[in-house]
Image (cartoon, rainbow, N blue to C red):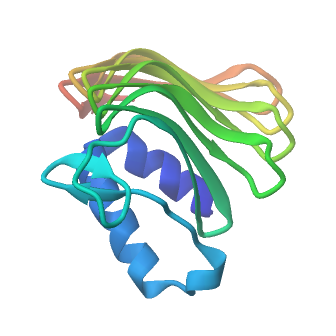
Amino acid sequence: MRKHLIKNILLVMPVSLFLLLSTALLSCAKKENNKIDLVNKNGLLCRPGSNVPFTGRENARLSGRIIEYDVVEGIKNGDFKILYSDGNPQIVGQMVNNKNEGIWKYYYENLRLESEGNFKNDIAEGKWIWYYLDGKLKEQGSYVSGKRDGTWEIYDENGKISAEKKFKNGELINK
């Protein structure tokens, strides 16, 4: 349930808001279970006690997950990963100027692909695909400016189309 929450948060929430919520969660959680080495100072990531923007790789822990990302001069640029506690990937993507960019992949704990899709400037854009736990196609469709658009196909567990839904600007217009 938590992994779906994290995935949905990343799909619709700007990274800056995600960081704010993550900071709030950290302040409420037990300190021994969570670790974060960077702090936000005026929109830039820095080491605690420093005003110098950080460059390097952050390895943080939050709610039993490992979060790794590249930072260049205080801004997330490069690889971004959320890993399960065993080190296997849960979410893998790229960041450009603190925003989700390009293909992002989400994984079940059994290492099978759960979903994949594209971000452009931190907004879901283009084709997205979801899979069942066994790897069979579950749902596919496209986003335009972060909203479902066009025909979305839903598949049953046998791989057959069980429904088609049409969206326009995020609104369901027919089944």
Looking at the rendered structure, the number of numbered marks drawn on it comes to 0
Tell which of 18 and 36 is nearer to you. 36
Instruction: Pick out the residue farthest to the left.
Output: 42
Where in the figure is residue 67, as x and y percent of width and height?
58, 49
Where in the figure is residue 32, as x and y percent of width and height?
64, 82
Q: Is residue 152 visible?
A: no
* 21 up-or-down from 174: above or below: below
Give the position of the N terminus as an image quadrant.
Answer: bottom right
Name the residue: 33% across, 56% down: 19
Q: Is residue 122 left or right of residue 36?
A: left
Q: Quadrant of residue 2?
A: bottom right
Q: Is residue 68 visible?
A: yes
Where in the figure is residue 103, as x and y percent of width and height?
50, 17
Where in the figure is residue 122, as x and y percent of width and height?
28, 29
Give the position of the C terminus as an image quadrant.
Answer: top left
Tell which of 172 and 79 is nearer to you. 79
* 48 up-or-down from 117: above or below: below
Name the residue: 25% across, 43% down: 14
* 149 up-or-down from 81: above or below: above
Q: Quadrant of residue 50?
A: bottom left
Name the residue: 50% across, 54% down: 6
